[in-house]
Amino acid sequence: MPFPCISPSLTDYLADSEIVDYHHPAIQALEAELRLQAPDETTFIRHAFEYVRDHISHSWDIQSSRITCVASDVLAHKEGICYAKSNLLCAILRSQGIPAGYCYQRLTLGDTPDTGYVIHALNAVFMPAAGRWIRVDARGNKPGIDAQFSLDQERLAFPIRKEYDETDYPFIYAEPHPSTIRVLRQHYDCKMMYLHGLPAEL
């Protein structure tokens, strides 16, 4: 299903900001390195996605207490939860003039509704060659999670289970939702935040 943009202007999906700080030298250096390996824009987008997916650890997977938020900090520490990783991927793509935004899902915290719900962040990127947006999820793969870059069919980390009242929020946001940034800035221990502090709805 198509996801409408919150903002009607693609320019808003290219903005540099305090969170998406793509003018930071480290992000510029990474962008240049990825560009050397990419003969075209689609390949660059795939490489950027795979870099964040595979080279930036999900903090919960490695049981880290560190909390990262700003894109350059996520890159410096090579870790973050989905909110943080989506900031970095957005920054890398925007650094090359590729419109990128945020999408959100409401998922169960565990495997069943009785565990409660959390908001999960992923990215949307505008594919110039195709003239449309696609969603990609750089959360990080592990047994049971196999997110991939695909122009044909979405391959996200978490397929929505409607029977569990999970849902896709049907918008592409130009900036990270304030609730996701607020939770990253209000906590000091990532493991405690992940278990008890993540928002349950937007």
Image (spheres, grey):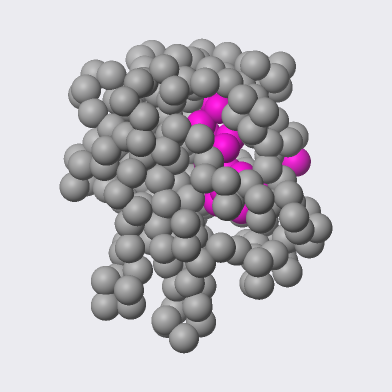
Give the vertical position of 60 relative to 13 (above or below): below
Q: Residue 150 falls in which quadrant of the image?
A: top left
The relative height of residue 79 versus residue 76 in the rendered view (above or below) is: below
Q: Check the image and report above or below for 200 versus 184.
A: below
Residue drawn at point x = 65 percent, y = 66 percent: 197
Magenta: predominant secondary structure element?
helix
> Is residue 91 magenta-colored?
yes
Q: Is residue 178 left or right of residue 182?
A: left
Q: Describe residue 165's horizontal placement relative to residue 111 as left or right.
A: left
- Residue 91 seen in render: yes
Residue at horizontal 35 percent and vertical 68 percent from the top:
166
Q: Residue furthest bottom?
A: 114
Residue at screen point 65% across, 16% down: 23
User: Residue 99 is drawn in which quadrant?
Assistant: top left
Q: Nearer the viewer, residue 183 or 28?
A: 183
Residue at position x 42%, y 38% from top? 173
In percent of width and height, residue 107 lies at 42, 67
Residue 195 horizontal/vertical position (percent): 64, 72
Give the mark count. 0
Q: Is residue 151 magenta?
A: no
Q: What x and y, as percent, mark residue 3?
A: 26, 42
4 sits to left or right of 136:
left
**What segment is highlighted magenta in the picture?**
77-92
Using the image as rendered, state which of residue 133 and residue 51 is in the foreground. 133
Evaluate whether residue 57 shows in this view. no
Q: Give how far across and how far down residue 98 sits, in percent.
A: 41, 20
| Position of 75 relative to 146 (above/below) | above
